[in-house]
Amino acid sequence: MVCPVEHSRAAPNEPARVLIVEDERVARQALGSLLSTCGYRVELAASAEEAIELLQRRLPPDVVLLDVDLPGMNGLELLSRLSSLAPDVVPILVTGADRDVVQPAADRGIGYVRKPVDINNLLCLMDRSLGRS
């Protein structure tokens, strides 16, 4: 896997921490591998509930990539809890759902990408969200 040069996190500053919340194992691992290759420090969670446990036990990430359509608590429900769990985290929704599902969050300034994820678009969105572009 090759990370686009302009997005490489091989800078002298500390790499951004990303929590990926995705119930589909292959998608979660693939996205995690891609972002790790790009220099991000990645943690993976298979559910919103697992993500909450990680957020309560560890240093909060810089970015949380949230699958909208999760079993149990969905990504939008987790999004509403993030402000109390990790108020400084940048949430980005990942969805295969119609735009109207994420539009209320997008209207509040929450970024989102559609599945299948275009890694370059995701990296650009992450850079903008983290103030790195």
Image: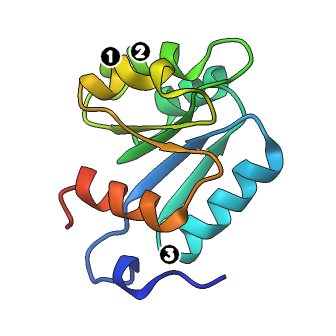
Q: Which numbered circle lies on residue 81?
A: 2
- Tell me the distance, in whole angstroms, between the alpha carbons under discs 1 and 3: 29 Å
Image vertical order of residue 54 relative to residue 83, above or below: below
| Residue of label 1 | 84
- Indicate which disc, 3 or 2, sits on the residue closer to the N terminus: 3
Q: Is residue 65 left or right of residue 28?
A: left
Query: Which one is closest to the eye, mark 1 or mark 3?
Result: 3
Q: Amino acid at mark 3?
A: Cys
**So how many labels did they put on this image?**
3
- Indicate which disc, 1 or 3, sits on the residue closer to the N terminus: 3
**Residue 112 x, y percent position in the rendering:** 43, 40
Mark 3 secondary-structure assignment: loop
Q: Looking at the figure, which quarter contains the C terminus?
A: bottom left
Query: Mark 3 touching mark 2, by CB under 8 A?
Result: no
Image vertical order of residue 123 relative to residue 61, above or below: below
| Residue of label 3 | 38
Q: Amino acid at mark 1?
A: Ser
**Residue 92 x, y percent position in the rendering:** 42, 40
